[in-house]
Amino acid sequence: MLATANRAKAREMAALLEGTPFRILNLADFPGVTMPPEGESSYAENALAKARAVASATGELSLADDSGIEVDALGGGPGVLSARYGGPGLSDPQRCEVMLREMAAVPRERRTARFRCLIAIVCPRRRREITFEGVVEGILLDAPRGDGGFGYDPLFFYPPLGRGFAELVADEKNRVSHRAQACQQARAWLLSEP
């Protein structure tokens, strides 16, 4: 079970876990399952809470993530609050606009940022819980670029490829992203478990 209500994230995680000997389900397969509200203290706490809730409700091995963008000029924020940055009910483009306004006077050399992803797996039958982390470093752009991805991808420039995350095709992003790194570790664990 992919414990996320974010359809774009569910598609990305399903692609990253493709080829494992599991049938990948999501919340659409269990419409009565609800997700707990996210906390403010850590990615791990949020990911584990989501995975535990879905595993408890379905009895299935559940995988959840919590991720965010950490901008050094914003003191590492919004971090764990990335999905709620700027206030409740904002769309991804609106949150990007808020961030661009706050960063307007920050010069390029101080616009360093990273995406961080924490994936939690909860296996109710074996009473096991494990987490994996992925981090990718980049630079916050001064305007959105590209049509792909979701969330803060249009603002995140990835120097090794010379393009922003929203300018990458899915296969490119799925080789280098924070979620890809964490999913690769989770995938290896899933394939090695007896």
Image: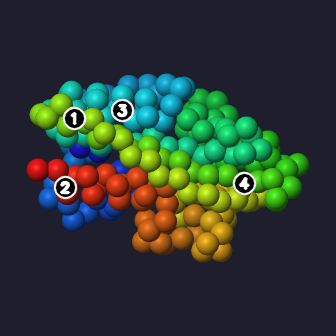
* Displayed quadrant of residue 183: bottom left
Sequence-wise first label, 4 or 3:
3
* Mark 1 residue element: strand
* Mark 4 residue element: strand
Q: Nearer the viewer, residue 42 or 169?
A: 42
For disc 4, the marked residue is 112
For disc 4, the neighbor class at 10 Å (few under 14, some 14 to 19, many from 20) is some
> Residue type at mark 3?
Leu
For disc 2, the marked residue is 192
For disc 3, the neighbor class at 10 Å (few under 14, some 14 to 19, many from 20) is many
* Mark 3 residue element: helix
> Residue type at mark 4?
Thr
> Residue type at mark 2?
Ser
Q: Residue at coordinates 58% horizontally, 70% vertically from top-left?
A: 167
Label 2, label 3: how many angstroms apart (C-alpha)?
21 Å
Q: Position of residue 10 (x, y in %)?
A: 36, 50
* Displayed quadrant of residue 33: top left
Q: Nearer the viewer, mark 4 or mark 2?
A: 2
Residue 146 in view in this figure: no
Given contact means CB atoms under 8 Å apart, are the residues at marks 4 and 3 in contact?
no
Sequence-wise first label, 1 or 4:
4
Q: Nearer the viewer, residue 57 or 63?
A: 63
Residue 161 in view in this figure: yes
For disc 1, the marked residue is 128
Q: Which mark is residue 48?
A: 3
Q: Residue at coordinates 43% horizontally, 29% vertically from top-left?
A: 45
> Residue type at mark 1?
Arg
Q: Position of residue 146 (x, y in %)?
A: 62, 67
